[in-house]
Each structure stands twice: as structure tokens, then as C-alpha cells.
Amino acid sequence: MNNNRKAVSQNSTIYTYRLLQRIHYQPYYFYMYTAIGIAAAVYSLMHLSPLQFIAGVIGVPLAHFFLLLLLLHTKEKRAAKTWRWYAGWPWVGYAPSGYLSLSKLRRLHRQLLWVLLLLAGCLYPWLPVPLLVFLGSFHLYLLFPRLFLLWRFRKHKENGYVIINEKDTSCYAQ
């Protein structure tokens, strides 16, 4: 029995992570952010057709999903197996489900931000201006909480690993 324990300990890999920073999701910010979203949705429905509004609400998260899949496949040379859909605030949409390097996560979200804004700008000649403003605003609305959390982890960008939970986002060092 003693030899079995020794064999397991010699062949196993042990990962130890040290917590650098944890950000708990505050309900106050969730309610405030939701109220802003509802007010913006009512305003958008007054200036857009319901079909345009629904297409934007469905299309922007799908664009985030497909662009993240494309970036993960081309830049990281691997499938997005460790990513999943989150429905909870602030990670609404496609986000990592396990540990991911903070520098990679920041780079992916920076590219996501600018590529989709540029894509919306390229559609300017074919789409009405109110729809473009709505698409851009909704894109920023979905990304702002993520970018804010990543900005708060900025001092750990060299060696940080991020994990997302239901009640907090944590940054660890390996």
C-alpha cells in the first residue's frame, strides 16, 4: 500500500494557484446596469422596428460567439472546448469556463471590441443609422462589464489566470 502512494505522488502533477484578486458581483451594480439596459431597450424600440430590435438582440451575441470561435481557432490553434454560454451578469454570452490566461482573455476581448465595431462601421452604407447606433451600443453594453473586470485585473496581466464563477471573478497566479 505504501508503494502505491509513492507511485501516485511521483507520477501526478499538482497545480497550485495563489489568489491574486477576487471581484465579487455586487447586486447594486446589477440592478443599476439592468435599469440602464431596460431604458435603452425602450428607447430603441421607439426608434426601431421590433424586427430590427430582435435581430440586434440576437445578432450581437451570435456575432460575439462566432468571432470568439474564429479567434480561438486561428490565434490559439485550438478548439474552444473550455468555453461555454453564460446567462448571468456580467459574463453574458460566450466566456471561458476554466482557467484562462489574463493576457489572452484581454487580447481576445480587445479584438472582439474593435473588430465588431469596425464591422458595424463597414455596414454603414446599407443599414439605417438608428440600427447601427443600436448595434454598436448593444455591443458595448454587453462588453463593458467584462472589460471593466479585466481592467481591474490589469496589474496581474503578466502572470494572472482568470476563472469565472457565479458570484465572482477571480485572478490567480500559478
Image: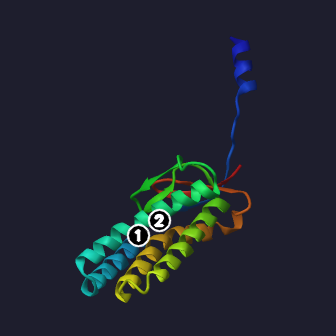
Q: Give whichever of 27, 109 is nearer the camera.
A: 109
Q: Residues within 10 Å of mark 1 (few under 14, many from 20)?
A: some
Query: Which residue is painted at 42% across and 87% down in the image?
Result: 125
Query: Which residue is painted at 39% across and 84% down in the image?
Result: 126
Label 2 belongs to which residue? 64
Q: Give whichever of 13, 126 is nearer the camera.
A: 126
Residue 47 is situated, as x and y percent measured from the top left of the image, at 28, 87
Residue 80 is situated, as x and y percent measured from the top left of the image, at 54, 50
Residue 60: which disc? 1
Residue 24 is situated, as x and y percent measured from the top left of the image, at 51, 61
Q: Residues within 10 Å of mark 2 (few under 14, many from 20)?
A: many
The local secondary structure at tag 1 comes to: helix
Amino acid on which the number 2 mark rests in the picture: His
Distance from disc 2 to disc 1, alpha carbons, whole Å, reads 6 Å
Query: Which residue is painted at 40% across and 85% down in the image?
Result: 133
Query: Which residue is painted at 58% across and 54% down in the image?
Result: 73
